[in-house]
């Protein structure tokens, strides 16, 4: 994801045949992708998608209410994501806003837990003016509130460089939240502190992918495992 409006990436990593057997193809989208034919997306082999729902304390993606149910209807395992603005409010306020505007979880075999997109802003201070302790507290606040609202651990989308800089290489979330890491143009992603001793759950490896049903570039991702593990994440089993 980039800036405040859409997940992005650069470069391309190609899975080997062995990897392809244990990695499930996914995408992430926002209103920047325009109208999406989700049936075509699913028929192209995309099994899951994260869809932008909210940002900060008031922004709602204008295509979320179309994309989210349409992906579900096409059989795409979908989840919502929230672009964090830690300088705008507490983590609790943003977690509640997210959960109330598309980010809640439902046990329907096709819904992933919500994702917190936490990275540098398009402009302004990389760490939003927060100290490393302040950022840790903000993330914890978001996590606790989202879990209280939904019963699920939010997925955390970030990069190793941002996380390590702005949280002070904090390891405190690695045992709680699944990691969705962004790292482009490499054969394997660098992982933020803490998760390096475990593994990644999702990996955004390019923003210049293409998928039938979407005009223009789209972010491409892998899920680290076979479909049964993806469904286990969706179903909290």
Image (cartoon, rainbow, N blue to C red):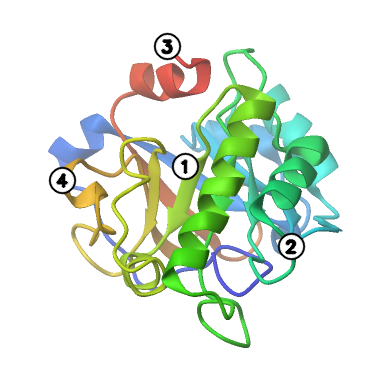
Image location of residue 71, percent across then percent down = 68, 33
- The residue tagged with tag 1: helix, strand or loop? strand
Disc number lying in front (4 or 2):
2
The tag on residue 153 is none
The residue that appears at 44% across and 23% down in the rendered structure is 233
Q: Callout 2 environment at 10 Å: few (<14), some (14 to 19), or many (20+)?
A: few
Give the Cα separation between the discs numbered 4 and 1.
24 Å
Could you tell which of marks 2 and 1 lies nearer the N-terminus? Answer: 1
Give the Cα separation between the discs numbered 3 and 2.
33 Å
Q: Nearer the viewer, residue 104 or 14?
A: 104
The tag on residue 197 is 4
Q: Which residue is mark 3?
A: 237
Quadrant location of the C terminus?
top left
The residue that appears at 51% across and 22% down in the rendered structure is 234
Is residue 160 rendered to the left or right of residue 65?
Answer: left
Q: Nearer the viewer, residue 22 or 165?
A: 165
Image location of residue 119, percent across then percent down = 51, 67
Could you tell which of marks 4 and 3 lies nearer the N-terminus? Answer: 4
Could you tell which of marks 3 and 2 lies nearer the N-terminus? Answer: 2
Q: Which residue is mark 2?
A: 89
The residue that appears at 44% across and 65% down in the rendered structure is 133
Report which quarter residue 124 is drawn in.
Answer: bottom right
Task: Say if 210 sits above or below 18 in the image.
Answer: below
The tag on residue 26 is 1
Asked if residue 74 shows in the view, the reply is no
Give the Cα separation between the discs numbered 2 and 1.
31 Å
């Amino acid at each position: 994801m980039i800036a405040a409006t859409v997940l992005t990436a650069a470069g391309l990593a190609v899975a080997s045949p062995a990897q392809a057997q244990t990695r499930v193809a996914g995408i992430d989208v926002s209103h920047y992708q325009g109208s999406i034919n989700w049936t075509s997306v699913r028929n192209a082999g995309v099994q899951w998608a994260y869809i932008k729902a909210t940002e900060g304390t008031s922004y709602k993606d204008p295509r979320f209410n179309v994309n989210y149910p349409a992906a579900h209807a096409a059989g795409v395992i979908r989840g919502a994501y929230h672009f964090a603005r830690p300088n705008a409010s507490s983590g609790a306020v943003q977690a509640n806003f997210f959960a109330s505007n598309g980010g809640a979880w439902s046990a329907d075999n096709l819904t992933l837990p919500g994702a917190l997109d936490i990275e540098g802003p398009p402009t302004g201070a990389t760490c939003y003016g927060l100290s490393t302790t302040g950022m840790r507290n903000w993330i914890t606040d978001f996590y606790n509130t989202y879990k209280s609202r939904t019963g699920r651990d939010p997925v955390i989308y970030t990069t190793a460089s941002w996380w390590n800089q702005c949280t002070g290489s904090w390891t405190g979330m690695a045992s709680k939240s699944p990691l969705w890491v962004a790292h482009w143009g490499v054969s394997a992603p660098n992982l933020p502190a803490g998760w390096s001793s475990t593994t990644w759950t999702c990996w955004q490896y390019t923003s210049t992918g293409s998928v039938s049903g979407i005009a223009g570039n789209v972010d491409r991702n892998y899920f680290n495992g076979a479909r049964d593990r993806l469904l286990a994440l969706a179903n909290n089993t």
